[in-house]
Amino acid sequence: MKIFESVINHKINTITTDELLKYAQQFNIKVQREQAKKIAEYLRGKQVNIFNPTERVTLIKEIAKLAGPETAKEVNKLFTQFTK
């Protein structure tokens, strides 16, 4: 795995609510604090690779269950920005 991918995946796997909100604001993505909290709690400690399309789809489906489909769609936009 490339070092860049490792750094991004590590950040996703250890993200806090405030960091998620900061990135959402930076990329003009709509996520409410309560939703960001649920997502950050879910992601913390997971070993997901957002550069793997299959893993990302599974992750987005889980986020949709936690925070709703619209929020999952917005978070997917954020992940897409990270993987570019």
Image (tube, rainbow, N blue to C red):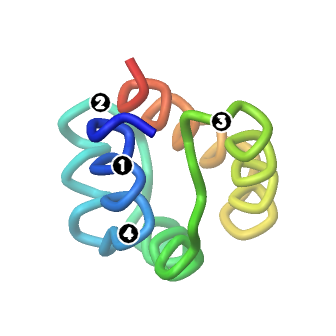
C-alpha span from label 4 to label 1: 26 Å
* Residue under pointer 2: 28
* Residue under pointer 3: 52
Q: Earlier in the sequence, mark 3 or mark 2?
A: 2
C-alpha span from label 3 to label 4: 27 Å
Q: Earlier in the sequence, mark 2 or mark 4?
A: 2
Q: Is 75 left or right of 20, judged from the image as shown?
A: right
Q: Is 47 left or right of 13, judged from the image as shown?
A: right
Question: What's the amino acid at mark 2?
Answer: Asn
Which residue occupies the foreground of this view, 4 or 21? Answer: 4
Element class at badge 4: helix
Question: What's the amino acid at mark 1?
Answer: Ser
Q: Residue at x 38, y 17 (%)?
A: 84
Which residue occupies the foreground of this view, 70 or 81? Answer: 81
Q: Residue at x 71, y 31 (%)?
A: 53
Determine whether 75 is above or below 43 in the image.
Answer: above
Q: Earlier in the sequence, mark 4 or mark 1?
A: 1
Element class at badge 3: loop
Q: Which mark is residue 33?
A: 4
C-alpha span from label 2 to label 4: 14 Å
Mark 4: few, some, or many residues within 10 Å (few <14, many ≥20)?
few
Q: Earlier in the sequence, mark 3 or mark 4?
A: 4
